[in-house]
Image (cartoon, rainbow, N blue to C red):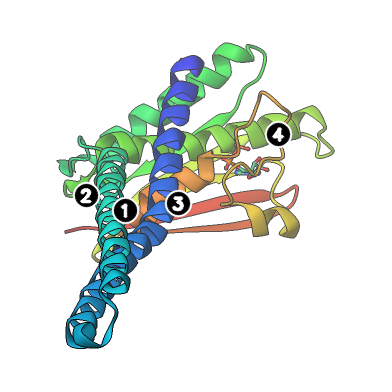
Amino acid sequence: LRKQISQQEKMASLGLLSAGIAHEIQNPLNFVINFSKLSRKLLEDMEDVLDELESKLPEDADDEIREIMDDLKENMVKIEDNGNRASSIVRGILLYSRGKDDEYIPTNLCQLTKEYVWLSYHAVRANNKSFNVAIKEEYDETLPPVKVIPQDFSRAVLNLMNNACYAVFSKSKGVTENPYNPTIQVSLKKDGDQVRLVIEDNGSGITKEVKEKLYTPFFTTKPVGEGTGLGLSITKSIIEQKHNGTIEMESEPDKFTRFTITIPIQ
Ligand code: ADP
């Protein structure tokens, strides 16, 4: 299961990464295409000027200039054609990484959240048999189906749950509170025309310094092999870009961390 989750995370990050690169390339590429078009147009203008000047120029000079201009025009066309080719590849990557199966489906979010909370709980238990964490769940069962990309929404839940589990687990190892009852609270409710998902843990908490870099891709405080630093950046882009929602974090080091996600109900 862990392997499956980390594979999902890797694929998602690969998609994000290539989308990011494609996006960054698109602008300079448009620049190249547009300026080669413009330069071709300038060459045509020069031709007109030459036509007007013809009688005043020695014949071989005129021929030579026209020859160079023809070569230049040919080069400009090649630049433009290849620019367009690269541009269509970039568009393809963008389309692909946005996910051809990015389908928004009216979804029972209570059921989906429950499933993934259960999954992450059992993943932690499977790896640390002696560790126990209390999961308190509160669901508004009257919540209407919400249009989401189910695999993306569940990835967001998994990412937040995995971080919460890690936080309570790592706190329990160096615990100062006595007794310490590792607890994760999950609540999913309707709030006006939004749905609000809160995942709160009483684990290690997040310092101000970490908070500033929280959503930066590849930022992690976990040891090598345990964190990719991509979970929250992916979650943020899933929630904000794909679902038009918000993600917020409140925390007090060594006390609690609360992530709140809202998604509009359409
Ligand atoms: P990763 O989990 O691979 O490190 P994330 O982007 O999911 O990547 O998280 C980045 C960092 O944010 C974590 O390394 C951790 O320091 C901090 N963090 C995230 N969630 C929590 C949490 N619930 N409690 C404490 N720290 C957290």
Q: The disc labelled 4 sits on which kind of residue?
A: Lys
Q: Is the C-beta of the residue carrying label 2 under 8 Å from the nearest atom of ligand 1? A: no
Q: Is residue 24 above or below residue 128?
A: below
Q: Position of residue 247 (x, y in %)?
A: 45, 57
**Quick one: label 1 or label 4, which is nearer the N terminus?**
1
Please name which of the two marks, 2 or 3, marks the residue nearer to the observer: 3
Residues marked 1 and 4 touching at CB (< 8 Å): no
Circle 4 crowding by C-alpha within 10 Å: few under 14, some 14–19, many from 20: few
Whether residue 225 sits left or right of residue 154 in the image: it is right
What's the distance in space between the residues labelled 2 and 1, CA to CA? 55 Å
Amino acid type for the residue under numbered disc 1: Ile
Q: Residue at x 61, y 52 (%)?
A: 214
Q: CA distance from mark 3 to mark 1?
A: 38 Å
Q: At label 2, which amino acid type do we have?
A: Leu
Q: Earlier in the sequence, mark 4 or mark 3?
A: 4
Q: CA distance from mark 1 to mark 4?
A: 46 Å
Query: Which quarter shows the C terminus?
Result: bottom left
The residue at which mark 3 appears reads as 236
Gap in Å between the C-alphas at discs 4 and 3?
Answer: 19 Å
Is disc 3 placed on a helix, strand or loop? Answer: helix
Q: CA distance from mark 4 to mark 2?
A: 36 Å
Q: Nearer the viewer, residue 143 or 89?
A: 89
Tell me, yes or no, whether the two marked residues, 4 and 3, touch with CB atoms within 8 Å: no
The amino acid type of the residue labelled 3 equals Lys
Residue bearing mark 1? 79
Q: Position of residue 39 (x, y in %)?
A: 31, 70
Residue occupied by mark 2: 143
Whether residues under marks 4 and 2 lie with C-beta atoms below 8 angstroms apart, the answer is no
**Residue indicated by mark 4:** 222
Pair 4/2: label in front = 4
